[in-house]
Image (cartoon, rainbow, N blue to C red):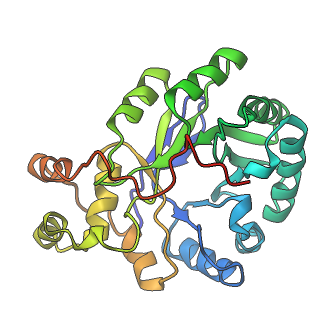
Amino acid sequence: MATGQPWITLNDGVRIPQLGLGVWQTPADETARIVGDAVTAGYLAVDTAAIYGNEEGVGDALADFPDIFVTTKVWNSAHGYDQTLAAFDVSARKLRRDVVDLYLIHWPLPMFDSYLGTWKALVRLKQEGRIRSIGVSNFYPEQLERIIAETGVTPSLNQIELHPTFQQHDARAAHARLGLATESWSPLGQGGALLGNPVLTSIAAKYGKTPAQVVIRWHLDNDLIVIPKTVSPERLRQNIDVFDFALDVSDLAEIASLNTADGRLGPDPQTFDRR
């Protein structure tokens, strides 16, 4: 079912599975079981974060699977050079990893102007061999340009809200120009409303797939890294059963028509200031 999974080679040469499991809002006491089920189903990557409160569950589940690609993120309260170094130590310990595959700045918090020091800490950790690849999440192009100009180090990817009703063409173009990959969070939208869209249900019927499988396939076909989350064993298996079909030109055109200017479902990174 999970054969033929695609990988993306990042700008630092690190390879990341293009499809992984996100564990945002996964209860801490259920995370180990769900991640274990994901590995059994064939998942090769897991995305967590300090703020999710479930890094220990991920670490427990993957203790015997060192080759599973693990991403985690530094939370807003740990912004700053020294604070980030300390926060990474905590995350690595919870994940039971001497080396973390990918470490991201979770939000830029531009109103506090602290993300540059945070980025410099990530650069140091990568130089020390404690992180294989470093990136960011929710950064705008001007913030990306600043950290690149100040450090000479380009993030390997930017993880942003991205789904068929919020396709982020400008951000993706900026990422391509700067030489970093795009990873999609909330790739299926939120609350399931998107999955009832008649365009998606029609395409799903055409291939004998679910609307969620069509949306995941859309991310893959657009060279996006995608991390759908679920706590359902059935949907866990369905979400990775997407390597036996591809969308055609007409499908892609129909899904392109779903994009809206006001399609954002999560916070605006320019104003989000939760610490």
Q: Nearer the viewer, residue 123 or 66?
A: 123
| Left or right of residue 261: residue 136 | right
- Looking at the image, can residue 150 be seen? yes
Q: Nearer the viewer, residue 275 or 177?
A: 275
Q: Is residue 90 above or below residue 241?
A: above
Q: Residue at x 40, y 45 (%)?
A: 224
Q: Is residue 136 above or below residue 35?
A: above
Q: Which x, y percent locates residue 121?
A: 81, 34
Q: Which x, y percent locates residue 241?
A: 35, 69
Q: Nearer the viewer, residue 17 or 169?
A: 169
Q: Is residue 112 above or below residue 70?
A: above
Q: Tell me the quarter of the picture where residue 46 sits.
A: bottom right
Q: Tell me the quarter of the picture where residue 170 sits.
A: top left
| Left or right of residue 6: residue 142 | right
Q: Residue at x 42, y 66 (%)?
A: 2
Q: Residue at x 64, y 15 (%)?
A: 149
Q: Which quadrant would the C terminus be assigned to in this image?
A: bottom right
Q: Which quadrant would the N terminus be assigned to in this image?
A: bottom left
| Left or right of residue 24: residue 213 | left
- Looking at the image, can residue 1 be seen? no
Q: Which x, y percent locates residue 99?
A: 79, 48
Q: Which x, y percent locates residue 74?
A: 74, 49
* Label tally: 0
Q: Residue at x 69, y 51 (%)?
A: 73
